[in-house]
């Protein structure tokens, strides 16, 4: 019973390509996030959605576009991939009230741009 | 700016106690979380402190002092499986988590 799932797990692609990463959570949470973890393990928030509405939008190149078709799904589309986009991308979700304190992370998508 | 400082690495032996410190500087601070991440894995939640004091969950405890902008994670009765990276993360009132750089804990036999 996977709580937060992401596809694909690995993604190897050429510079300039466009790719998408999908995320789904079956926890009934209202809030979902995208994080980027670089090679030094620095974990940085990119976006957050609450019930399909964008609530956090960090300083991320506009080549990155999140989309939330419903509150259980948050996808990330990346246009014109660059070498510096190589990283692990984690999706996460959290509930409301006190359960907001815990974020549940997906297994990550390892993106390598060549 | 917003930043968190924690040691980059800590080494300890099985059965010992280790403390990982975290100092933070963020606007609109709401609470401090701790996450564990094994190599190749996802971050997993360990604990959260919104109020000053100690929170205990089994072998792990976390402490927060809001006046000192400081917290720590205490791991007791260390086991080999505790070897991992540990991240402190400050939550602001907008629900955003700002993560520290992580502390790599190595547990030796």
Image (cartoon, rainbow, N blue to C red):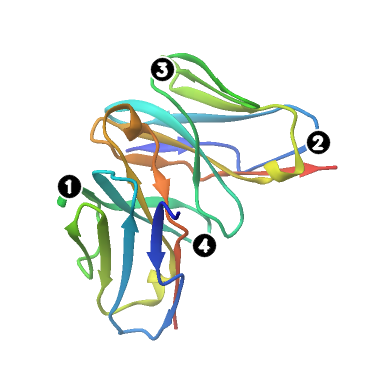
Q: What residue sits right under mark 1 in the picture?
A: A51
- Image spot of residue A80 (x, y percent): 27, 80
Give the position of the N terminus of chain A as an image quadrant: bottom left
Label 4: chain?
A: A
Label 3 residue SS: loop
**Gap between marks 3 and 1, in whole Å?**
31 Å
Q: Given contact means CB atoms under 8 Å apart, are the residues at marks 4 and 1 in contact?
A: no
Q: What residue sits right under mark 4 in the picture?
A: A39
Q: Given contact means CB atoms under 8 Å apart, are the residues at marks 2 and 1 in contact?
A: no
- Tell me what residue is drawn at x 65 percent, y 27 percent: B59
From this viewpoint, which residue is outermost toward the left? A53
- Image spot of residue B108 (x, y percent): 81, 43
- Looking at the rendered structure, whether the residues under marks 3 and 4 are on a common chain is answered as no
Location of residue A38 with respect to B102 vertically, above or below: below
Label 4 residue SS: loop
Q: What residue sits right under mark 3 in the picture?
A: B66
Label 1 residue SS: loop
Q: What residue sits right under mark 2 in the picture?
A: B14
Label 1: chain?
A: A
């Amino acid at each position: 019973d996977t709580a937060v799932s992401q596809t694909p797990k690995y993604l190897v692609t050429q510079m300039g390509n466009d790719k998408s990463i999908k995320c789904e959570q079956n926890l009934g949470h209202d809030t979902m996030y995208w994080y980027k973890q670089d090679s030094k393990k620095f974990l940085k928030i990119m976006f957050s959605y609450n019930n399909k509405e964008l609530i956090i939008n960090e300083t991320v190149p506009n080549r990155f576009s999140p989309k939330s078709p419903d509150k259980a799904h948050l996808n990330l589309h990346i246009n014109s991939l660059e070498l510096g986009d190589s990283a692990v991308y984690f999706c996460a979700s959290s509930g409301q009230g006190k359960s907001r304190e815990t974020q549940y992370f997906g297994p990550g998508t390892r993106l390598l741009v060549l | 700016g917003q930043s968190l400082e924690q040691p980059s690495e800590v080494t300890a032996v099985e059965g010992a106690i280790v403390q990982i410190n975290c100092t933070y500087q963020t606007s609109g601070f709401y609470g401090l979380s701790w996450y564990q991440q094994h190599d190749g894995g996802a971050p997993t939640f360990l604990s959260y402190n919104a109020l000053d004091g100690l929170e205990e969950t089994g072998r792990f405890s976390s402490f927060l002092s809001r006046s000192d902008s400081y917290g720590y994670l205490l791991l007791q009765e260390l086991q080999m499986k505790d070897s991992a990276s540990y991240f402190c993360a400050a939550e602001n009132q907008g629900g955003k988590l700002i993560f520290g750089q992580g502390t790599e804990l190595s547990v030796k036999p």
